[in-house]
Image: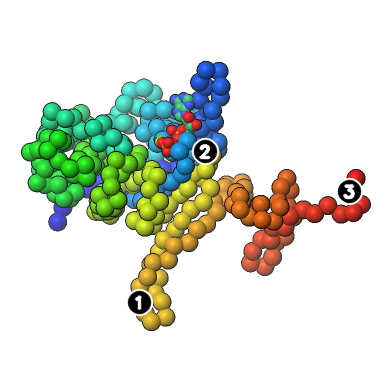
Amino acid sequence: MTTVTAPADAAIDCTDLVRIFTADGIEVQALQGLTLRVESGGLVAIVGASGSGKSTLLGILSGLDKPTAGTVTVAGRDLLALRSRERVDYRRRTVGFVWQQTSRNLLGYLTARENLALAMSVAGTGDRDRRATELLELLEVGHCADRRPTEMSGGEQQRVAIAVALANEPRVLLADEPTGELDEATSAEVLEAMRGVNRELGVTTLIVTHDPTVSEHVARTVQIRDGRTATEVLRRTGVNEEGHEHTVAEEFAVLDRVGRLQLPQEYLSTLGMRDRVRLALEQDHVGVWPHVADEEERP
Ligand SMILES: Nc1ncnc2c1ncn2[C@@H]1O[C@H](COP(=O)(O)OP(=O)(O)OP(=O)(O)O)[C@@H](O)[C@H]1O
Ligand SMILES: [Mg+2]
């Protein structure tokens, strides 16, 4: 049993986030009105094609970058209102990160235990030795405590990196492609380790990944397309007619605050929908039809 605890009232709340980068006089809209809410203690995977805005979102949530427009609250803190000293404090105490490059997460000349001790001394966490041992054991890398990163496998390094990210008792854990450099079996282990941490410590966790199998490990997977949340896959455990438990995965379109939703490209092209559609409210659903112009309307 572990006694490591983290506050449970954390949540992520982004509304209409826009982030425009200007490079060589050309504007790139990395986020185009992204809205996302993650409940306290939730575990969510963000998937999306390269360039869809995933890292831009994490940069904002981690306090490294600021949005061009929109609002963002993490663990009750309005990130746009933070002054520079509060921003440093936010980064040290409220959030933990894991990066894709194993080498970026750990200092190569320190052992696992020393990497954790350093992170804890920066955050001012107490009872460091006991907490370091507990976290390494929670992530099943207790045997790596006195090893340097070069003496560990890639998967062990990433599990130690998760322990380091948790050293400051963060309310929110952010991971950008934590399994990007790992093979399939090791990726599954690291994702399971993150799920375990989320369950044991109640840390709100957001994992960005290219890995399409991630939705097998988490209950909620959000897909970002063109800087906006487009669809979500929710998994739940159901019971079939013979009484056996099985997992049901359902895909949903995301409906934003003002009622906008994105229809899949395949539906649009199959039914030749463009510019405008007819809507009808039915008893328990909404019908959407392509607009076919009447004879009189035609030129
Ligand atoms: N600092 C920057 N300056 C200019 N453009 C940027 C900058 N950072 C990101 N972009 C652009 O914003 C868009 C989104 O980039 P982002 O890194 O968020 O994508 P991503 O979903 O993380 O992609 P990947 O899966 O390849 O990591 C891209 O078109 C990228 O070129
Ligand atoms: Mg990225």
Q: Is residue 37 above or below residue 105?
A: below
Image spot of residue 19 (x, y percent): 51, 30
Q: Is residue 24 above or below residue 129?
A: above
Separation (CA) of disc 1 from disc 2: 40 Å
Q: In the picture provided, is 236 more to the left or to the right than 285?
A: left
Task: Give the numbered dot on residue 182.
Answer: none
Image spot of residue 256 (x, y percent): 57, 47
Name the foreground residue: 298 vs 285. Answer: 298
- The tag earlier along the polypeptide, 1 or 2, is 2
Badge 2 marks a residue whose secondary structure is loop
Query: In which quadrant of this rendering is ligand 2 seen?
Result: top left
Q: Residues within 10 Å of mark 2 (few under 14, many from 20)?
A: many
Q: Is residue 163 above or below residue 264?
A: above
Specify the color scheme. rainbow
Task: Give the numbered dot on residue 227.
Answer: 2
Kindly tell me whether mark 2's CB lies below 8 Å from ligand 1: yes
Identify the image quadrant of the C terminus.
top right
Image spot of residue 30 (x, y percent): 51, 32
